[in-house]
Image (cartoon, coloured by chain):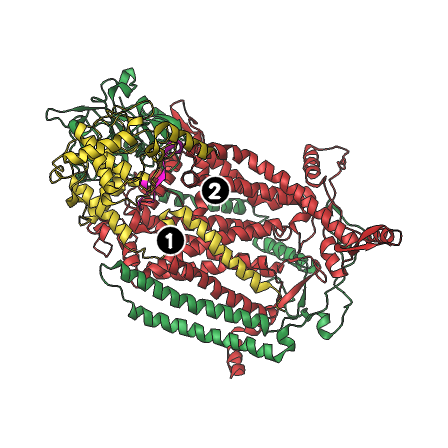
């Protein structure tokens, strides 16, 4: 601790000894100090610090009755706190949690909480009240010192470094010093390498994983979460289906696959759809399938408005227009939601024609280099 | 008995030196000086409740079938982390209380750090010799947010899972290394099976250790520098006026700890926080309306929401996601500027003296105005994070809310700056008036000549001192350096200095007072 | 003032009953016709669909609805056709007070209903008598005794993104919103099968009647179970929690710091 004067220079404020107007020895001004005041204006005729105002006694200092009342308050609160703690212990057993009974959990939470709160609040208020009404409130003065060490201390510190330098030869033996620095600089580098296997080195390249989903030609579209396949006839006008690939439940990395493959299926009037020429045949009788993963930062874009045909992301309010191949009409997303080309198999079930033709979800650095075709 | 015990202890620890050193250290009294303590105390509550929670929480993403008491999740497949969080909430006595205390305390921890920082800023307590402690405090603020976010993610519920997904999306948007950072963080593709245990290690080991170390350092500096105080009669730059640690301050601070603890307990008793059972386990397909981060991440989420469409480009087979990079850069710049502000002001004023007397915010109008602009900027971003709730609760379109906030993020700080500076100057003028001429007493007197005047009551010298004791800075004059040249840096500095100090109200000097008194008499 | 004159004008034009009823323009309703995949929820409703009911419904419809929706349900510039919307849609729209519309706006709002249950059912019967559409749901799917766990999961996947996981509602585009779910089981069921306003349709091929029963059960569980952790702050999520922490938590603590450091007298 640099403060080597604690305790020594503490003095009770002069008024506490009864002086109405203390002669204030501490009202030195900075103009005498040696460091630059910068652009501060140090006026010569500034008003003088009048010193501490006279001390005003509290009611508890002058009225013994008030003092006793305060004391009564304090010990009553201590007892109240004690009661609160004991109540908590009793409540722990008196309000057990019964199986399948949220009401009992609620009662347990309330009872324990009230007990603990009471114990803490009463204790805290009591101690503060004690300090405010019964402990001395005479203001005291502590002297400050410049934060930097004294010139002698500083000189000695410099001297110590000097001596250390001489004795070790750090400054003199350049080869030793430089090789030490070299060793120290390189020393942390293995730590960086050691983190490489946070993603195992044997695992496939990230970009290849981000570029594909588990959708493939002929894979049926299934309901989330039951996994039952969907017939085209099931999807009535105005409907929205939350879709996963059939067989997702058996997939090795279920959640990771679902995080990419989740799809939203909607049926619009074919006349409402503005299909791009190159995507003719990607829909089936007004039924369209789009990735549910936002192209902004990846929230599920699942809010479908069946009249306006808008999709809204609840996280950052990007809006996509389903009639115009899910182009962005509002919000921070930049790219349309990728479309899953679909058709119908012999039994009338909806199937994927292929995987998505572009990576789904948020953008990544290498995204533009991915060529899925 | 006491003597014997303390002697036993002192013989072995030389504790008496410590007591002598610190026992009667003086702390000044002001309500705003307690805000840092609130942060410290909520952190203690977090450590206590958090340690308790670790005994019951299972930080694993192994899939289990939930068999606890909450009926609408029975039999549902979820991670062990989620299942154990539900068990803590429903089946362990006092578990829900501890969880809720931990979470409420976390919200208060960061809120009180925020208020503490605002107090430090607006009173100029960051000036020499405390610049480094400001930086340490700022780092603590950032670490506290990191603690909060990692903790928010641990239950692996739907809300936090979507939060993590947003982080993943942002990370992927970083040029060159984004994809790899995402894969290293999640051990593969999102969500993977390792992120919860990894965040857990950060949350309960690494981050708390660094926070504890930095808090210790922060407090060491408070002891070294001694506490600042507001200007007032008897208070100078060379002293500290207040109450000693033993007994008064220790009692107040100790009692206050229990009160803060009690307020947190009360909140946890009567108010639900983060009902993970409503959200259910994380599943990449669903999402809830009103998916938001905890309040302290709100400004970042809001920044993401305010970006207009189309800011993403492909160039040379690489993707540049400016819809992510712009908010990241804006927030980064904002944080860095706030962190180095003490050094900027030091450069502008060139004042190398130590400052232990606090400024009243009005007496540093431009600093206060910059602060107001910063707070407004932060506030607009923060508000943007609840754009959807503003839309539903005030019956307006969410698009209009966003468009309004997009305009405000640029305009509001400027308006806040101008208005605040004007208000500060007006208040200074009023102070000067009162210091010179006293209060309007409301008493009207008819002079013998038939003239009516209102009697002004003069301040006593103690009250006047509060109004007149502040440092006045003049704009820097450009002067050639020793080689007779005016450097660009000096021009810049003079320009900023003029901007800072050209409008100023000088404190009342004794001469002014004499003139004023002569006129009134 | 302008409200009062509006009301008077309308009264003059449309007769006394219409004063209460047909009010506004710019209304959109369930879009388009229905090809309902119904697996027989229509039995046991013969008395509801009696000829008397249909006749009473016709009168009420002519007086209250026909101005906008047309005497033959054909719709108009300001209101959609009701051909094929079915009894469920009428029961939901009129039964929750959304119809007749009170004012033009982004969407119809829930308000105290204007008709007795009997009158609502009569209008529903009349509309259903003219074209096939989703009927009023069978009570056995409304008993709130289904599988809450399945219902909660389906709710999270199909409903929570708009209505919030706790059914507290949320924002949609252009000033529309998904309302907080406080309806009766029947109205909730009807909303799912009819897709009122911008809500998509969840036909029985998507969510089977049993699935819908499970969802209603889960909603009932959330509604009927007291919030275990204390007051739920509107179940709106972290924004409400953050506001509360700042206003009440920090507010209380700052008040304490002021008391703590105030000079005692």
Chain for mark 1?
A: B
Q: Are marks 2 and 1 in contact (CB under 8 Å)?
A: no
Mark 2, secondary structure of its residue: helix
Point out residue A62 in the picture as x, y percentages from the top left corner: 65, 77
Determine whether, in the image, residue C47 is placed left or right of residue C7: left
**Residue B80 in the image, given as x and y percentages of width and height:** 26, 52
Q: Is residue A371 above or below residue C233?
A: above
To which residue does mark 1 refer?
Answer: B273
Q: Secondary structure at mark 1?
A: loop
Return the residue found at the far top.
A277
Residue at 61% in and 55% down: A161
| Range drawn in magenta | C163-176
Visual hue assigned to chain C:
yellow
Q: Which numbered disc, 2 or 1, marks the residue that appears first in the sequence?
A: 1
Q: Measure the C-alpha gap from mark 2 to mark 1.
A: 20 Å
Which residue lies most toward the bottom here? B1
Q: Which residue is mark 2?
A: B382
Query: Chain drawn red, letter?
Result: B
């Amino acid at each position: 601790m640099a403060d080597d004067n604690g305790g020594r220079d503490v003095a009770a404020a002069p008024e506490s000894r009864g002086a109405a107007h203390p002669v204030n020895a501490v009202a030195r001004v900075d103009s005498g100090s040696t460091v630059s005041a910068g652009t501060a204006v140090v006026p010569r005729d500034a008003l003088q610090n009048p010193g501490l105002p006279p001390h005003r006694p509290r009611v508890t200092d002058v009225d013994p009755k008030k003092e006793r009342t305060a004391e009564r308050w304090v010990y009553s609160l201590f007892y109240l706190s004690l009661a609160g703690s004991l109540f908590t212990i009793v409540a722990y057993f008196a309000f057990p949690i019964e199986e399948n009974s949220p009401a009992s959990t609620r009662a347990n939470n309330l009872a324990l909480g009230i007990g603990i709160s009471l114990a803490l609040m009463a204790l805290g208020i009591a101690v503060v009240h004690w300090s405010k009404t019964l402990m001395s409130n005479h203001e005291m003065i502590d002297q400050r010192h410049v934060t930097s060490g004294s010139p002698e201390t500083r000189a000695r510190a410099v001297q110590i470094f000097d001596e250390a330098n001489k004795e070790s030869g750090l400054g003199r033996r350049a080869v030793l010093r430089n090789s030490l620095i070299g060793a120290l600089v390189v020393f942390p580098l293995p730590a960086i390498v050691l983190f490489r296997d946070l993603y195992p080195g044997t695992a496939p390249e990230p970009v290849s994983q981000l570029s594909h989903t588990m959708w493939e030609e002929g894979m049926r579209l299934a309901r989330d979460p039951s996994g039952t396949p969907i017939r085209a006839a099931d999807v009535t006008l105005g409907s929205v289906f939350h879709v996963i690939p059939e067989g997702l439940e058996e997939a090795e990395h279920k959640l990771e696959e679902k995080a990419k493959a989740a799809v939203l299926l909607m049926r619009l009037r074919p006349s409402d759809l503005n299909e791009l020429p190159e995507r003719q045949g990607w829909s089936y009788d007004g039924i369209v399938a789009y990735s549910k993963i936002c192209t902004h930062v990846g929230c599920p874009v699942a809010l479908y408005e069946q009249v306006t045909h808008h999709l809204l992301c609840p996280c950052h309010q990007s809006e996509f227009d389903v009639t115009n191949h899910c182009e962005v009409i509002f919000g921070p997303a930049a790219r349309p939601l990728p479309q899953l080309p679909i058709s119908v198999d012999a039994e009338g079930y909806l199937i994927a024609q292929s995987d998505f033709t572009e990576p789904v979800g948020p953008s990544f650095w290498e995204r533009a280099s991915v060529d899925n075709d | 008995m006491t003597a014997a015990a303390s002697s036993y202890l002192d013989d072995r620890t030389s504790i008496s030196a410590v007591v002598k050193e610190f026992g009667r250290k003086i702390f000044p009294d002001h309500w705003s000086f307690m805000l840092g303590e609130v942060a410290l105390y909520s952190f203690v509550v977090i450590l206590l409740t958090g340690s308790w929670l670790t005994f019951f929480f299972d930080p694993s993403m192994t899939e289990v079938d939930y068999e606890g008491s909450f009926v609408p999740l029975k039999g549902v497949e979820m991670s062990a982390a989620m299942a154990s969080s539900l068990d803590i909430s429903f089946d362990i006595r006092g578990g829900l209380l501890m969880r809720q205390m931990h979470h409420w305390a976390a919200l208060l921890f960061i809120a009180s750090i925020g208020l503490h920082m605002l107090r430090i800023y607006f009173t100029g307590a960051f000036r020499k010799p405390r610049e480094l402690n400001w930086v340490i405090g700022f780092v603590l603020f950032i670490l506290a947010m990191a603690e909060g976010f990692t903790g928010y993610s641990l239950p692996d519920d739907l809300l936090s899972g979507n939060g993590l997904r947003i982080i993943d999306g942002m990370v992927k948007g970083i040029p060159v290394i984004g994809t790899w950072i995402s894969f290293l963080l999640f051990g593969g593709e999102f969500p993977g099976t390792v992120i919860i245990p990894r965040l857990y290690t950060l949350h309960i080991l690494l981050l708390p250790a660094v926070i504890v170390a930095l808090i210790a350092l922060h407090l060491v500096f408070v002891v070294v520098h001694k506490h600042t105080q507001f200007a007032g009669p008897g208070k100078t730059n060379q002293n500290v006026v207040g109450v000693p640690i033993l007994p008064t301050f220790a009692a107040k601070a100790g009692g206050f700890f229990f009160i803060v603890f009690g307020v947190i307990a009360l909140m946890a008793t009567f108010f639900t926080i983060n009902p993970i059972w409503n959200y259910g386990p994380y599943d990449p397909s669903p999402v809830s309306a009103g998916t938001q981060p905890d309040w302290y991440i709100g400004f970042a989420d809001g920044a993401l929401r305010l970006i207009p469409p189309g800011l993403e480009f492909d160039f040379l087979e690489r993707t540049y996601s400016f819809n992510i990079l712009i908010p990241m850069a804006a927030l980064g710049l904002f944080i860095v500027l706030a962190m180095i502000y003490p050094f900027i002001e030091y450069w502008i004023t060139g004042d190398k003296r130590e400052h232990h007397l606090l400024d009243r915010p009005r007496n540093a109008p431009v600093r206060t105005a910059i602060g107001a602009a910063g707070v407004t900027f932060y506030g607009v971003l923060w508000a943007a994070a609840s754009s959807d709730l503003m839309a539903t609760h005030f019956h307006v379109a969410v698009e209009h809310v966003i468009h309004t906030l997009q305009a405000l993020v640029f305009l509001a700080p400027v308006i806040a700056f101008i208005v605040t500076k004007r208000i500060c100057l007006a208040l200074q003028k009023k102070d000067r008036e009162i210091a010179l001429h006293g209060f309007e007493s409301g008493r009207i007197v008819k002079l013998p000549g038939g003239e009516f005047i209102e009697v002004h009551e003069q301040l006593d010298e103690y009250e006047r001192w509060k109004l007149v004791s502040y440092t006045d800075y003049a704009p820097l004059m450009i002067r050639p350096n020793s080689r007779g040249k005016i450097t660009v840096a000096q021009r810049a500095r003079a320009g900023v200095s003029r901007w800072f100090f050209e409008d100023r109200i000088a404190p009342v000097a004794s001469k002014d007072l004499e003139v004023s008194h002569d006129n009134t008499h | 003032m302008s409200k009062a004159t509006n009301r008077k004008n309308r009264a003059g034009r449309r007769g006394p009953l219409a004063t209460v009823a047909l009010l506004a323009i710019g209304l959109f309703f369930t879009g388009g016709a229905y090809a309902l995949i119904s697996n027989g929820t229509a039995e046991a409703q013969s008395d509801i669909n009696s000829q008397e009911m249909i006749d009473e419904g016709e009168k009420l419809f002519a007086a209250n609805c026909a101005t906008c929706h047309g005497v033959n349900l054909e719709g108009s510039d300001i209101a959609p056709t009701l051909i094929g919307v079915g009894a469920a849609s009428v029961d939901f729209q009129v039964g929750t007070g959304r119809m007749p519309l009170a004012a033009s706006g982004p969407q119809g709002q829930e308000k105290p209903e204007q008709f007795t249950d009997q009158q609502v059912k009569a209008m529903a019967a009349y509309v259903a008598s003219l074209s096939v559409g989703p009927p009023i749901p069978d009570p056995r799917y409304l008993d709130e005794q289904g599988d809450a766990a399945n219902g909660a999961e389906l709710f999270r996947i199909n409903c929570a993104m708009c209505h919030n996981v706790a059914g507290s509602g949320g924002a949609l585009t252009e000033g529309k919103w998904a309302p907080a779910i406080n309806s009766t089981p029947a109205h909730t069921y009807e909303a799912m099968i009819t897709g009122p306003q911008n809500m998509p349709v969840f036909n029985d091929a998507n969510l089977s009647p049993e699935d819908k029963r499970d969802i209603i059960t889960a909603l009932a569980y959330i509604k009927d179970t007291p919030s275990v952790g204390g007051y739920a702050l509107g179940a709106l999520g972290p924004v409400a929690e953050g506001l509360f922490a700042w206003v009440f938590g920090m507010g209380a603590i700052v008040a304490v710091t002021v008391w703590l450091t105030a000079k005692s007298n």
